[in-house]
Amino acid sequence: MPIVVWGNGACANIGNRFRYFLTEVASHGYFVIAIGPIGPRTVESGGNTMRPTDTATPAPDPRDRPQDTHWRQLIDAIDWAVAEADREYGPYFGKLDTDRIAVMGMSCGGLQAITASADPRTTTTMIWNSGTYPADGGRVLIGAEATKASLASLHAPIAYVTGDERDVAFVNANDDFDAIDHLPAVRAWQHGLGHAGSFRTPNGGSFGTVAVAWLDWQLRGDPDGARWFVGDDCVLCRDDTWTLRTKNLD
């Protein structure tokens, strides 16, 4: 199985926060590792609880405080999976394809994914509802450490997927896509969705379907997956609820 590692929205240390979405991806034959231990089931289906320690006290700007997780945990996940694939008599011995690794994340986790994707083992990257802050912003999200300069370290095909203009990451995702000229890139957004996307709807909703199509194409070379993104008659091109931009996909 190809390997997929995931950074949570808000850089939350809750492994099941995106269970509906990630379980859909895993059901297509991917070995998915999300940051964090299993939290209460209530975090899976909605609500605003991104951390078990939420209180009534107003939180400071997230860019000003350490996050619950760190981008290096995505590297830890890759290291662990690679070791398990080679551990004789272990449950995953010979079952993981360590040459096909996707790094993904949502919001703060998307910024973590950008930084972690500099790892040469990365085969593809998917950034969900996220993008680096403007270069003149003078701030970096602690725990993610991604900046516009980080984009130069990317070396594998990348896709940015968000909601429409109401998504707080919409502009930053567009700006990242415009800045990336050295590798294949996709920018897609769905109209009618905001920053929360469709992650916590059954099977991850439309985002789950798009994730599987991209991974099937990039990690398995599946032409059916490619048809979602390339060609004048591509699946997302024909769907009026989506806007798609691409570069360097030839």
Image: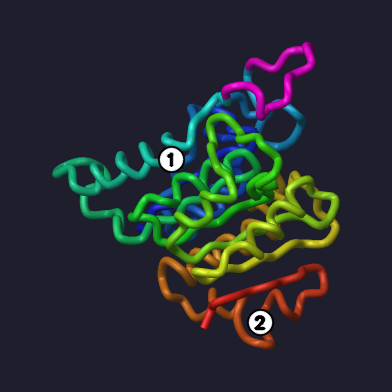
Front-most of residues 92 and 72? 72
Where is residue 247 drawn, in percent x and y? 60, 75
Residue 144: which quarter of the image? top right
Query: What span is in magenta?
Result: 53-66
Estimate the x, y position of residue 110 in percent, counting from the top left. Answer: 58, 46
Q: Picture coordinates of residue 208 (x, y %)?
A: 62, 57
Q: Say whether residue 121 is left or right of residue 62.
A: left
In the image, what residue occupies the spot 19% across and 47% down? 86
**Residue in front for this viewpoint, 245 or 41:** 245
- The relative height of residue 231 versus residue 150 in the rendered view (above or below) is below
Label count reads 2
For image coordinates 69% across by 72% down, the residue present is 245
Q: Does residue 115 appear to the left or right of 202 in the view shown? A: left
Q: Residue furthest left?
A: 88
Q: Comparing marks 1 and 2, which lies closer to the viewer?
A: 1
Q: Amino acid at mark 1?
A: Leu
Residue 8, above or below 189 = above
x%, y% of residue 26?
48, 52
**Which residue appears at 49% of the width and 39% of the height?**
34
**Residue appearing at x 39%, y 56% in the figure:** 122
> Label 2 is placed on what type of residue?
Cys
The residue indicated by pointer 2 is: 234
Q: Is residue 29 above or below residue 43?
A: below
Residue identified by numbered label 1? 74
* Cα–Cα gap, marks 1 and 2: 32 Å
Residue 245 painted magenta: no
Is 129 displayed left or right of 31 in the figure?
Answer: right
Q: Secondary structure at mark 2?
A: loop
Residue 61 within the magenta-colored segment of the rendering = yes
